[in-house]
Amino acid sequence: MATPHHNINAIHTAFGYQQRVPEDVPPFSSPVLAGGTYWLYTFEEEGVYDYVCSPHEAFGMAGRIVAGSATGPGAEPIDMESEDEQARPPTLTAALVLSDEALDPERIVEEGSVSWDGVADESKQLLIEIRGGEEPVSHNSHE
Ligand SMILES: [Cu+2]
């Protein structure tokens, strides 16, 4: 990673999310990494893997990797209406990014990769506003 303080955190029920990695995959997460370092993970099961960077999830730092074919729970649309606090959707802008059509799993398979520039600006909008000394204010306007 080029800059510090990022990690990889699977969108997995063990972390309180609705499952967005293949069903048989154990939960996985990297440590928060220093700049210039890396972390290795081997994809053992075929399917869609959604993940977020825990410190920056609300800001849209999320990703999708398709190992083999676009299958499994991550191939389905994110359930934004879920009221199950033990199975919540990805948070705020991460949910927008992962719902953007640029990250359609079949498209990722076809094109091999999708660039950040391919994600629509409105999917990158911040849904929280941080002002000096105040708590973040929710502007959860996409529901
Ligand atoms: Cu990050």
Image (cartoon, rainbow, N blue to C red):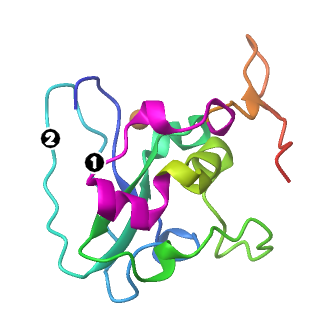
Residue bearing mark 1: 31
Give residue 116's position: percent from left, percent from top. 43, 34
Task: Relative to 140, say whether 35 is above or below.
Answer: above
Task: Relative to 2, say whether 30 is above or below.
Answer: below
Give residue 115's position: percent from left, percent from top. 37, 37
Q: Mark yes or no: residue 123 visible.
A: yes
Task: Please rate how many residues cluster around mark 1, counting C-alpha atoms within 10 Å: few if below 14, some from 14 to 19, many from 20.
Answer: few
**Which segment did they paint magenta?**
103-123
| Closer to the camera in the image, 64 or 87 | 64
* Label pair 2/1, CB-CB below 8 angstroms: no
Residue bearing mark 2: 38
Residue 12 is one of the magenta-drawn residues: no
Give residue 139's position: percent from left, percent from top. 84, 36
Q: Would you identify the image quadrant in which residue 114 lies?
A: top left
Judged by its main secondary structure, the magenta piece is helix
Q: Quadrant of ligand 1?
A: top left
Residue in the picture at 42% in, 45% down: 53
Separation (CA) of disc 2 from disc 1: 10 Å
Q: Is mark 1 within 8 Å of ligand 1?
A: no
Q: Amino acid at mark 2?
A: Tyr
Question: Which of the image's four quarters has the N terminus?
Answer: top left
In-image side of 103 versus 41 (left or right) = right
Nearest to viewer (mark 2 / mark 1): 2
